Image: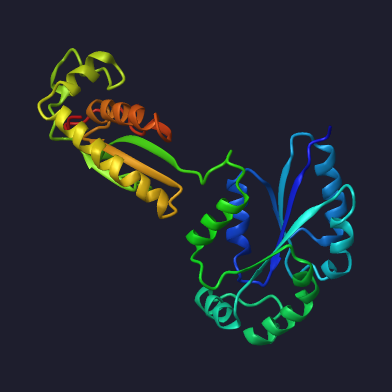
Amino acid sequence: MEEQKQIVIITGMSGAGKTVAMQAFEDMGFLTTDNLPATLLPQFFNMVRTNPTVNRVALVVDVRALDLIGNLNEITSTKENTAEIIYLDASDQELVARYKESRRQHPLAHNGRIMEGLKKERSVLKGVKERANIVINTDEYSPRQFRKMLFEKFSNGEHKAPFNVQVMSFGFKYGLPLDADLVWDIRFLKNPYYDEQLRTLTGLDKRVYDYVMQSDGAQAFYETYMKLLQLTLPRYILEGKTSLVIAIGCTGGQHRSVAFAERIGQTIEKTYKTRITHRDIELRKESSVRS
């Protein structure tokens, strides 16, 4: 028996949240496409129907597809194509405020007046709104709240809002990572560089790793920092953050930071999707500044 395809068409007023909705559906595992002309929907649906790897699809169709009114109902209500239409709306006052904040021009406001564009758009989309399965007014939703609502309604339990953690080691003498959210300096730990047997190794080597972890203060720092992360990571997720970069730094990014990035990353990956990287581990430049 052929598996039923889940098709969602997202439409509605410009500025009401279609971009946020599309990103949310993409994060839920839907194949998404933005502003596909309505005349191409039959071919798109045929591709979806015949592709066994695609079972969940979300399309954003906006007012610029002016032929939407004429054939949307026909092409989405056949035996082969059944789609759920979500119509996003907001008050004129809220939409005007959003346009002024973004400084964008309404697609139908050719004379520059937002209200004229909104009036024309409501008239064009009136029939679509009447045929929609779900009408959502986004006036009272922040982008984070809107995403959460969509996940609660449309996620099948297999997909949750993504949250990816990257734990990175680096050397301060090469500069701070520009994309770091949290930066920790562990140059207070004893430096393996001054042990000639360890100098040419890195924190990936067991001898260096053990040396760092047995240093005075290392275990206390690890336990304290993990408690802090256990407190903060779930709250970052609740606030809608989808990724976090944790940067652990020592002087050259060879020994102490590498060992700690490995230990912290391996602990975090038991709970969250985690990537461990070592930005400066290959930069063995001759320098009087020790790593």
Above or below 243: residue 84: below
Q: What is the x, y in percent for residue 133? A: 73, 62
What residue appears at the point 20 percent right and 32 percent down from the top-left corner? Answer: 223
Q: Is residue 286 left or right of residue 132?
A: left
Q: Is residue 6 left or right of residue 139?
A: right
Q: Is residue 269 left or right of residue 43?
A: left
What residue appears at the point 27 percent right and 22 percent down from the top-left corner? Answer: 203
Above or below 36: residue 191: above
Residue 276 appearing in the image:
yes
Q: What is the x, y in percent for residue 27? A: 58, 47
What kind of colouring is applied to the model shown? rainbow
Residue 220: image quadrant is: top left
Above or below 101: residue 190: above
What residue appears at the point 77 percent right and 43 percent down from the top-left corner? Answer: 5
Above or below 40: residue 233: above
Q: What is the x, y in percent for residue 221? A: 17, 34
